Amino acid sequence: MAQTFDPKMLDLLRCPAAVKLNKQPGDDFGKLELYKDSWLISPDSGNKYPIKNGIPIMLIEEGEKYKNTPVEQLPVP
C-alpha cells in the first residue's frame, strides 16, 4: 500500500531554495503548494519537489531539475 502525503505538512514545510534566497527576517517565504498529491511547488523559487511514497524529496538539486517543466508535464514520481 502506497503512503500518501499529509496536506497538513504544508503548514510546516518550506522550499529550501526560497528560504535561502529570502533575506528579510520574519517573512513567511517559501510556502509550498500541493499538486496532484505528487508534487510540492514553490511559487517563490519555481522549484518543484516530487513526493515519493508519501515523502517529499526536499533537496534543492531535486527541485531545480523540474523548475522549467510545466506542471501538466510533470511525471508521476
Image (spheres, grey):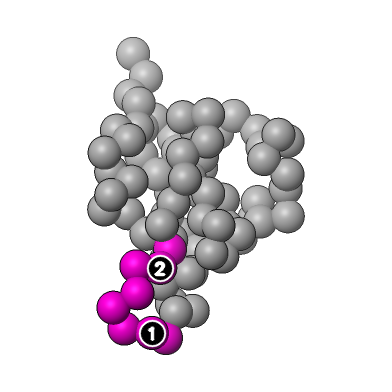
Q: Is mark 1 on a helix, strand or loop?
A: loop
Q: What element carries label 2?
A: loop
Q: Which amino acid does label 2 sit on?
A: Phe
| Residue that lies at the very extreme toward the top in this rendered image | 1
Q: Disc 2 versus disc 1: distance between alpha carbons?
A: 9 Å
Q: Are marks 2 and 1 in contact (CB under 8 Å)?
A: yes
Q: Which amino acid does label 1 sit on?
A: Gln
**Residue labelled with disc 2:** 29
Q: Is residue 24 magenta?
A: yes
| Residue 28: x %, y % from top left | 34, 67
State left or right for residue 4 relative to residue 20. left
Which disc number belongs to residue 24?
1
Label 1: few (<14), some (14–19) or many (≥20) C-alpha neighbours in 10 Å: few
Residue at image x 46%, y 39%?
A: 34
Q: Does the magenta stretch include residue 4?
A: no
Label 2: few (<14), some (14–19) or many (≥20) C-alpha neighbours in 10 Å: many
Q: Give the range drawn in magenta.
A: 23-30
